[in-house]
Image (tube, rainbow, N blue to C red):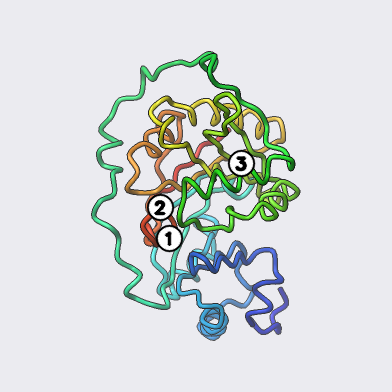
Amino acid sequence: MGSNEFLSASTLVEKKYFDVEPISRRIKVYELPEDMSEDRMRELKTAASEMDCDKLIFYVKSGSEEEAVVQDLNCYYEAEIKGFFRGEDAKIYANYLDPSRNHADTENVISHVEEMDFTDKMKREKLHDNYTIIWGQEKHAEEMAAFYKGVFSKYPTPIHDPDYIVKMMRDHVHFSLIYSGDELVSACSADIFSEYEAAEFTDCATSPAHRGKGLLSYQYPLLENKMKELGIQTMFSYTRAISMGMNIVAAQQGFTYGGCMVRNSMIGTGLEDMNIWYKTL
């Protein structure tokens, strides 16, 4: 971005290193403007307000000048993803346009998860005969949208829309699907950040009747191996801070807890805290 370019709402939508997510009322900034300053921050806040976003999230290289800049601009440190920037560590800071949003839930399960011992976690060679795992394709989009709608009444992205799922598949997102007979009962995806050689485990869901069977534990390794084939260096995941099951899955799969993103994602009960987990491949 040139130093004379005004940070308008349209600018944020057009630039690839600004990720505008209106459902969760947040904007992620992966590359700071070269002349980031208090004036630039005001411009960014004004543009965010125009789009009804009240949380700004900055990903900066650990120990960099950019990190010092966001610290000087009164941003709050929330988490880290080691290896996010092509092997270099990322620190994640937040700035809240609405201070009332900066209040963490007291129900985060991370302390309980960190007390558990996963050294002897169960090894699974293959799925039970009742289940089949496949790669998601565009022809599955309608079925997937209906499945996600049945699991999540609220979600940070419009994943209830089959057209959106097709767009994701065409934009470097790989889905794994598990069926029980002809019924889709579990799904998960890996969203590739190709410019950073990182990928996010996301869109994880299992039908209530099929939970407790470890179905996501079969999908994580499948997606992880795919990412290795594609040259991805780092995997990371946002998990609902109040979900014991999802945080346990991340820990079982060898991910490291990186911190908590406060009132970060529109999911489940509303705007919820999300725990960051990361893994170097």
The spot of residue 80 in percent (x, y) is 45, 51
Q: Pointer 1: what residue?
A: 264
Determine the residue positioned at 53% across, 25% down.
218
Determine the residue positioned at 52% across, 84% down.
42
Residues at discs 3 and 1 in contact (Cβ within 8 Å): no
Q: Earlier in the sequence, mark 3 or mark 1?
A: 3
Label 2 amino acid? Met
Q: Earlier in the sequence, mark 2 or mark 1?
A: 1
Q: Pointer 3: what residue?
A: 190
Task: Indicate whether 219 appears above or below 43.
Answer: above
Q: Pointer 2: what residue?
A: 274
Q: From the image, which quarter does the C terminus lie in?
A: top right
Q: From the image, which quarter does the N terminus lie in?
A: bottom right
Label 3 amino acid? Ala
Task: Indicate whether 99 appears above or below 26.
Answer: below
The part of the image, by quadrant, that contains residue 184 is top right
Determine the residue positioned at 66% across, 51% down.
162
Task: Give the CA distance from mark 3 to mark 1.
Answer: 19 Å
> Would you say 75 lies left or right of 66 here?
left
